Amino acid sequence: MHDDLAEVLLTEAQIQHRLDELAATIQRDYAGRELTLIGILTGSVIFMADLLRRLALPVRLDCVGVASYHGATASTGEVTWTKFLRLDVRDREVLVVDDILDTGLTLLRVREAIQKLQPRSLKFAAFLEKDVPHRDGCRADYVAFKIPDKFVVGYGLDYRERYRNLPYVGVLKPQVAGV
């Protein structure tokens, strides 16, 4: 798997250090309140688990399944729901956790769906934010890393369901990703 990478963009140590900082900020912002974390499957699982373990406050956990890449290296522009919430989020503090903010389409669709459920507050955390224009100027409230517009894998992000288990973030060689 390592031979498929053109470069390592973020090392395991960089990721762990930044997650400590990000968790401290979230901890401060939600101090004294119960937080409902909602992970966007499947890419956010590792980020969400590592973030969750760093939070010393009451946390409820649920996931939604949303897909927009469908095996490609760029968003298809179409969002497909594969799983919706089990927990009631009405009048709750909600933080949606995603792996990457690219076009912003997933964030917009998830925001629309969850807003209808009337949470007390709704914020978004992204592990990575690509340096590209986002739809309707959407932004995450918490971002671990801003990255250039490159197709990345590792730390939960995949290409055709491979590379999620890498403990760092790397850029695939063009011949591997077919780009």
Image (spheres, grey):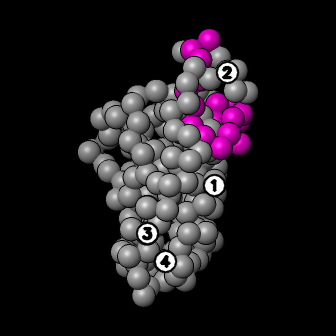
Looking at marks 1 and 4 on the same chain, the residue that comes earlier in the sequence is marked by 4
Label 1, label 3: how far apart the Cα atoms are: 19 Å
The magenta segment is 157-175
Name the residue tied to disc 1.
45
Instruction: Say which residue appears at 40% left-offset and 52% top-offset.
Output: 143
Query: Which is more toward the observer, 116 or 67?
Result: 67
Is there CB contact under 8 Å for labels 2 and 1?
A: no
The quarter of the picture where residue 53 lies is bottom right
Mark 2 burial class by Cα count in 10 Å: few <14, some 14-19, many 20+: some
* Amino acid type, mark 2: Asp
Specify which label sits upstream in the sequence, 3 or 2: 2
- Of label 3 and label 4, which has the lower sequence position? 3
Q: Which corner quadrant holds the N terminus? A: top right
Inter-mark Cα distance, 1 to 4 = 17 Å
Q: Amino acid at mark 3?
A: Ala
Given contact means CB atoms under 8 Å apart, are the residues at marks 3 and 4 in contact? no
Looking at the image, is mark 1 or mark 3 nearer the viewer? Answer: 3
x then y, percent, for residue 127:
48, 50
- Which numbered disc, 4 or 2, marks the residue closer to the eye? 2
Q: Amino acid at mark 1?
A: Val
Res 92 quadrant in image: bottom left
Task: Judge whether 2 appears above or below 139 on screen.
Answer: above
For marks 4 and 2 on the same chain, the one whose residue lies earlier in the sequence: 2
Q: In the rendered view, does 160 fall on the left or right side of 108?
A: right
Residue at horizontal 31%, vertical 49%? 138
Residue identified by numbered label 4:
35
What x and y, as percent, mark residue 50? 60, 60
Residue 36 appears in the figure? yes
The residue labelled by disc 2 is: 4
Residue 59: percent from left, percent from top: 56, 78
Q: Secondary structure at mark 1?
A: helix
